[in-house]
């Protein structure tokens, strides 16, 4: 199922499909986030706050504006955790 | 290669105690220390250089870098700690500086890699190796990697990268001497350059061949890390962190003042001042007025005399420095534990609405101790727009420790709700003014994208090193500003300018703020000296409402002359004047609205 980082539920795991274009996408890629990588959502702060994900066992926080532009393909079951 | 007379064999890592080792004909070779943020690069740097390090700004930027000396077998090297970067295809100002320093060339590049996150770190490592400079790799945090079940075959990694790889644990010093002794094995990696998608493919290949990951349980630390960014639990933890920090700062700061600095000033410096005063020919001479200031009831008062040698030294060294040291100690601790990025996550939604991102909370909190380091810390923000908003908001609406003492001194006796009214007004002004600036200024509010490092037990020496660099920076940068400020205040308060200016402004005070015209004098004087301003307001028989208005107006205009100067330095003349204009307007609007509110009540 296709969705975005900000509409994923906490604890769900998915595969990155598409990064936003431009500088923000490059910034994410520099941090190791790129299409094909598996990520697990840890939390989202209220009032359009940042979303925290786990990538390769490491937490990364991403501002609300960007993570709504990161397309994710959910894994079945979706309850994955840290590797 | 030259050896000092003490150690003909060489091999010592510390600066030589020989004051004149004959190395004058040698231009020191340059070593660059590069790596991602949070890989223990500064711990490695302090292990290699000891305390003789200098932090400075890269020319034309607000990005700082640290430089020190490393001695190997008697030869002195210049070691440069390059700002942390994820890529040298820059995505922010720090990475631009990293790229520029790397392109200037180096004799040896030490690439620091976090063994717990090999894949991401290799991205930068391969980019740096492509530059074709002689390099070695420090594979740092190997202890933590082992703990997490990550096993890296060092020899295989050496083969893959084509340069020496030395496992290290910078915080404990493990592997550092190996690293130093193998610096001369640094070489240019021979593999052809790989670009873009190919690089990630190559990284995947390397990771598969050198790294094996064992089974790892979801540990208690993971639990705490997840809770720290949870909306509810994270906020609770954040509140504890703030309260704990303020308590620690107060206890440390007051302890240093009461037990060490005040007694020294009182017992050793004051007698010296009195003696100097009598040498200068007593009160009335120009030199006495400038150096010692005026006497209060015939005595020199270090807080109120306002001479260069009295208040000019007492305020920065005895009243402010201890709190700054305490603030920096707590900040360095939170930074090394890894709490600050989590704090930024908690505050991001709020800060985003005033055009900043979560990390702007750090300078803001610093400003609560003293606005000067707070405004200096706005350099960590990425764009000029953010720095302008953050610096302006700090100087307008963040009361420093001295100002808070004044607020409580003036209103505490009248009742807590008046103190609360002042704090509430300041917070509202901060939020509203930030929102307005965000809407009016061209540009956009950047998004937070930040790696959150795992919680780590900080090393005392690491915190000590950071604290030392920061305090040294404060002494060099802030004290001259305060001295200039005191000097200007001295000149202004003895000239007639202030008097005629306050006469000119008094109708404004009556009309907008509802204050008697004679309050214009003290409030204007508050530009220079808040303490005296409050002292002059107290006997004027203001009602509590008027007192709140007067104190808010005082608090929102210049915190002090040193802040004025640091704003000038950080923002430039044009933006500083703009910031001051905003400050005066905001003070009048907030004071005027409060006055209207009190009139209704």
Image (cartoon, coloured by chain):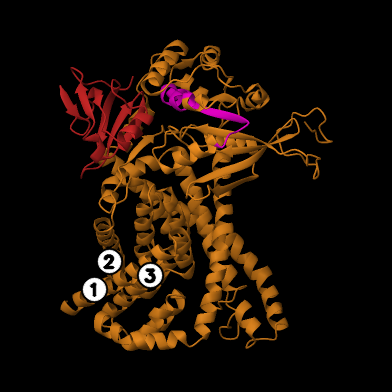
Chain colours: A red, B orange
Question: Residue B453 at x, y = what percent?
Answer: 41, 33
For the residues bearing labels 2 and 1, Cβ distance under 8 angstroms: yes
Callout 1: SS:
helix
- Same chain assignment for discs 3 and 1: yes
- Let me know if residue B68 is in the magenta part: no
Q: Is residue B270 above or below residue B322?
A: below
Where residue B487 sits, quadrant-wise, is bottom right
| Left or right of B166, for residue B447 | left
Q: Within 10 angstroms of label 3, few (less than 14), some, or many (20 or more) residues? A: some
Q: Residue at x 61, y 79 (%)?
A: B290
Q: Earlier in the sequence, mark 3 or mark 1?
A: 3
Circle 1 residue: B594
Quadrant of the drawing holding the C terminus of chain B = bottom left
Q: Nearer the viewer, residue B545 or B560?
A: B560
Callout 3: SS:
helix
- Let me know if residue B119 is in the magenta part: yes
Q: Tell me how far mark 2 sits from mark 3, CA to CA.
A: 15 Å
- Same chain assignment for discs 2 and 3: yes
Q: Nearer the viewer, residue B454 or B511?
A: B511
| Left or right of B155, for residue A50 | left
| Left or right of B272, for residue B491 | left
The dot on residue B398 is: none
Q: Viewer-nearest of labels 3 and 1?
A: 1
Q: Which residues are magenta?
A: B104-126
Circle 2 residue: B425
Which chain is indicated by disc 3? B
Q: Within 10 angstroms of label 1, few (less than 14), some, or many (20 or more) residues? A: many
Callout 2: SS:
helix
Circle 3 residue: B408
């Amino acid at each position: 199922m296709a969705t975005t980082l900000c509409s994923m539920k906490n604890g769900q795991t998915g595969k990155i499909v598409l990064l936003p274009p431009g500088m923000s996408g490059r910034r994410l890629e520099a941090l190791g986030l790129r299409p094909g990588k598996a990520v697990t959502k840890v939390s989202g702060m209220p009032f359009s706050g940042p979303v925290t994900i786990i990538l390769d066992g490491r937490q990364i926080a991403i501002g609300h504006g960007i993570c709504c532009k990161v397309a994710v393909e959910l894994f079945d079951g979706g309850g994955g955790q840290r590797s | 290669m030259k050896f000092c007379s003490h150690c003909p064999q060489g091999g010592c890592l510390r600066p030589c105690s020989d004051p004149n080792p004959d190395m004058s004909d040698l231009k020191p070779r340059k070593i660059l220390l590069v790596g991602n943020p949070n890989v223990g690069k500064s711990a490695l740097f302090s292990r290699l250089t000891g305390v003789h390090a200098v932090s400075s700004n890269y020319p034309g930027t607000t990005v700082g870098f640290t430089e020190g000396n490393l001695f190997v077998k008697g030869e002195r090297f210049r070691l440069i700690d390059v700002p942390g970067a994820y890529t040298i295809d820059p995505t922010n100002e720090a990475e631009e500086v990293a790229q520029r320093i790397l392109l200037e060339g180096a004799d040896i590049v030490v690439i620091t890699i976090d063994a717990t996150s090999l894949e991401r770190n290799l991205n930068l490592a391969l980019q740096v190796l492509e530059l074709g400079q002689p390099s070695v790799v420090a594979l740092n945090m190997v202890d933590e990697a082992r703990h997490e079940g990550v096993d890296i075959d060092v020899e295989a990694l050496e083969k893959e990268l084509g340069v020496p790889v030395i496992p290290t644990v910078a915080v404990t010093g493990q592997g550092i001497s190996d690293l130093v002794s193998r610096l001369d094995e640094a070489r240019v990696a021979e593999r052809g350059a790989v670009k873009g998608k190919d690089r990630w493919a190559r990284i995947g290949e390397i990771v598969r061949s050198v790294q094996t990951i064992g089974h790892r349980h979801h540990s208690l630390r993971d639990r705490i890390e997840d809770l720290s960014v949870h909306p509810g639990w994270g906020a609770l933890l954040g509140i504890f962190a703030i309260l704990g920090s303020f308590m620690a700062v107060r206890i440390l700061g007051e302890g240093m003042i009461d037990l060490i600095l005040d007694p020294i000033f009182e017992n050793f410096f004051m007698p010296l001042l009195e003696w100097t005063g009598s040498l200068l020919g007593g009160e009335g001479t120009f030199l006495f007025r400038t150096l010692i200031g005026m006497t209060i009831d015939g005595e020199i008062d270090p807080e109120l005399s306002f001479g260069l040698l009295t208040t000019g030294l007492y305020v920065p060294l005895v009243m402010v420095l201890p709190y700054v040291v305490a603030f920096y100690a707590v900040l360095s601790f939170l930074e090394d534990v890894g709490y600050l990025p989590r704090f930024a996550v908690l505050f991001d939604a709020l800060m985003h609405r005033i055009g900043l991102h979560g990390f702007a909370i750090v300078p803001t909190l610093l400003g609560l101790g003293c606005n000067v380091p707070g405004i200096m810390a706005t350099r960590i923000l990425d764009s000029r727009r953010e720095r302008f908003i953050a610096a302006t908001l700090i100087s307008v609406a963040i009361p420093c420790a001295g100002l808070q003492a004044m607020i409580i001194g003036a209103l505490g006796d009248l009742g807590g709700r008046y103190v609360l009214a002042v704090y509430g007004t300041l917070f509202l002004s901060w939020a509203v003014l930030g929102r307005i600036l965000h809407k009016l200024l061209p540009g956009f509010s950047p998004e937070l994208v930040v790696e959150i490092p795992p919680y780590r037990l900080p090393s005392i020496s690491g915190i000590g090193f950071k604290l030392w660099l920061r305090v040294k920076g404060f002494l060099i940068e802030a004290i001259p500003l305060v001295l200039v400020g005191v000097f200007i205040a001295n000149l202004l308060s003895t000239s007639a300018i202030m008097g005629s200016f306050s006469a000119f402004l008094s109708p404004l005070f009556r009309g907008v703020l509802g204050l008697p015209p004679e309050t214009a004098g003290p409030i204007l004087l508050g530009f220079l000296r808040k303490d005296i301003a409050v002292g002059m307001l107290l006997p004027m028989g203001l009602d509590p409402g008027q007192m709140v208005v007067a104190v808010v107006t005082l608090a929102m205009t210049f915190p002090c002359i040193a802040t004025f100067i640091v704003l000038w330095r950080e923002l430039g003349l044009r933006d500083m004047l703009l910031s001051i204009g905003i400050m005066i307007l905001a003070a009048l609007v907030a004071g005027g609205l409060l006055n209207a509110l009190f009139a209704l009540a």
